[in-house]
Amino acid sequence: MLPILEIIRLEDSEDGVFGVLKINKKVFCVTLELPDRLNAQNISCIPAQQYICKRFDSSRYGKTWQATNVPGRCGVLFHSGNIVDHTWGCILLGEYFGKLQGDRAILNSGKTFKRFIEKLDKYSQLHLTIKDCY
């Protein structure tokens, strides 16, 4: 059975879209995406809906996952990063919310992303649902 990922978005502001990621109904980490700007590539989060994620080898981030079937978009990856400027239209993963040099952020991202990749290593495909709850 495919793992079920769910991102529950809690807040949308100019600081970014902050949420939590659940894997098989258990909270795994926090997320950060770009603010909602109607799905415009590289400046917006993706629409809240269902996606299939597939393994992807990124030249920048290494082994990761890519959300497929995103309307009008490609290259939407899960990766590490701390502030909204690190997202580039992708989904950042971190251990907890905080501040980094005065900016709202998610922290301990590198280790959290590594745990995410290790936890899902045996799969080739994932089901992702994104819900807006703000």
Image (cartoon, rainbow, N blue to C red):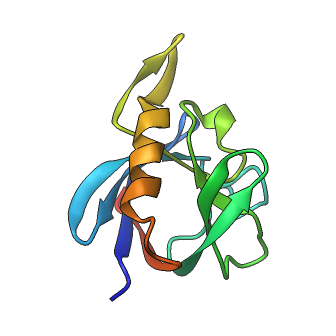
Above or below 110: residue 120: below
Q: In which quarter of the image is residue 95?
A: top left
**Residue 125 visible (yes or no):** yes
In the rendered image, which quarter contains the C terminus? bottom left
Answer with left or right where residue 56 lies relative to residue 50. right
Answer with left or right where residue 49 lies relative to residue 29. right
At a point 30% along the width and 66% down the height, the residue shown is 23
Number of callouts in the render? Answer: 0
Residue 105 in the image, given as x and y percentages of width and height: 48, 28
Point out the residue furthest to the bottom here.
Answer: 1
Residue 125 in the image, given as x and y percentages of width and height: 52, 80
In the rendered image, which quarter contains the N terminus? bottom left
Q: In which quarter of the image is residue 69?
A: bottom right
Q: Nearer the viewer, residue 123 or 69?
A: 123
Residue 94 in the image, given as x and y percentages of width and height: 42, 39
Q: Nearer the viewer, residue 35 or 68?
A: 68
Point out the residue furthest to the left here.
Answer: 26
At a point 77% along the width and 69% down the height, the residue shown is 74
Q: Which of 40 and 31 is in front in this view?
A: 31
Q: Which of 121 and 2 is in front in this view?
A: 121
Above or below 70: residue 37: above
Residue 80 in the image, given as x and y percentages of width and height: 56, 40
At a point 48% along the width and 25% down the height, the residue shown is 104
Point out the residue furthest to the top here.
Answer: 101
**Residue 45 visible (yes or no):** no
At a point 67% along the width and 66% down the height, the residue shown is 56
